[in-house]
Image (tube, rainbow, N blue to C red):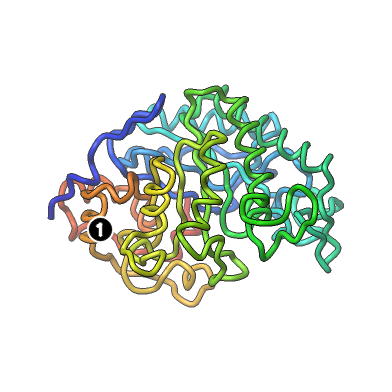
Amino acid sequence: MDVSPLFRRFRLKALDLPNRIVMAPMTRRFSPGGVPTPDVARYYRRRAEGGAGLIITEGTTIGRRAASNDSAIPNFHEMASLEGWANVVTEVHEAGGRIAPQLWHQGLVRAPGSGPHPDARSEGPIAAPTGSCAMTDTDIADTVDAFAIAAASARQIGFDAVELHGAHGYLIDQFLWSGSNMRVDGYGGGPVERTRFAVEVVRAVRKAIGPEFPLIFRFSQWKLQDYGARLARTPEELEQVLTPLAEAGVDIFHASTRRFWEPEFPGSELNLAGWTRKLTHRPTISVGSVGLGGADFTQQLLGSSTSAPVGSLDNLLERLARDEFDLAAIGRALLSDPDWPRKVRDNQREALMPFDKAALLSLS
């Protein structure tokens, strides 16, 4: 098996990666009080030692009281948490790795009364029957600022890039998707109009981090509450959504899918990352059950499957070789096997470990 497409160097602005392997962000809730512990730093260092080119952290919440539904999810705004993240950066860099935080606001997905500030009302583009509130212009402006402040902190701490979580039905995605954004003001309407909030976040973040610090934007068609949801039903609609984001300052699009090998639109074999690269001319990250066979990502999340066997990499390597996309994010395979990149590089396929859900409870 020729694995060289996965081990080509990747350079973009200040980011210089030895290979095309990205550790996908995976929420694990191991940060009591929102503060990453030394164990969290060791967890990420172990993946850097195993050879991951770029690590994207679990979702880290911005400085809005309703951003998080769990006090054990790390935040990215309190001093103690930023000090914990600085330790993570040090550990990863000492192991030769590169790392980016994923900045997150859960929006209406957050259950009212949950998280470190249970008295805060959950917020989103519209009000929800649960008592959540529709964000005012002041709320939106403050949220945009909170994303920018967190991104500036990431650069100051020494991270190598920053990712905005605009996928899976969380706050930014709630504004992008017609199924959750029925606003009749300047933040709602057609596909382009619904990008306004995301564009304002991207512009503010770009201003805060400067022109050379890489900015990644993660998006998806599917949502946690609706796996069949679509931001765009045609390439033309997808271009309407992504072009304003690219023009606002996105450097890399992280196109989240459940199965990376599935075509995104009829009449073409391109997946979502492939179409995104074609339409925006920006580098892209593809993700979705890479390196595994059997049960898919959604089944794992729902608990209907506890393991997944090692899968073929042939399809991934073929797509990388023809530059359909630029980088491949590895989630469950890398969670169970920190040495996955090294083993693949050295053609030690027999040594690769299958996914075991018990790994979700481990910091190894």
| Residue 72 in sight in this render | no
Residue drawn where x is 47% and y is 56% of the image: 256
Q: Position of residue 23 (x, y in %)?
A: 40, 47
Residue drawn where x is 46% and y is 36% of the image: 251
Residue drawn where x is 30% and y is 60% of the image: 291
The residue most toward the bottom is 304
The answer to which of 292 and 268 lies nearer the viewer is 268
Q: Position of residue 209 (x, y in %)?
A: 57, 25
| Residue 349 in sight in this render | yes
Q: Is residue 353 above or below residue 54?
A: below
Q: Position of residue 101 (x, y in %)?
A: 53, 38
Residue drawn where x is 41% and y is 40% of the image: 282
Q: Is residue 273 above or below residue 13?
A: below
Position of 164 compared to 120: left or right? Answer: left
Q: Type of residue at label 1?
A: Leu
Position of 243 compared to 149: left or right? Answer: left
Q: Position of residue 204 (x, y in %)?
A: 65, 31
Position of 363 compared to 176: left or right? Answer: left
Determine the image quadrant of residue 75. Answer: top right
Label 1 sits on residue: 352
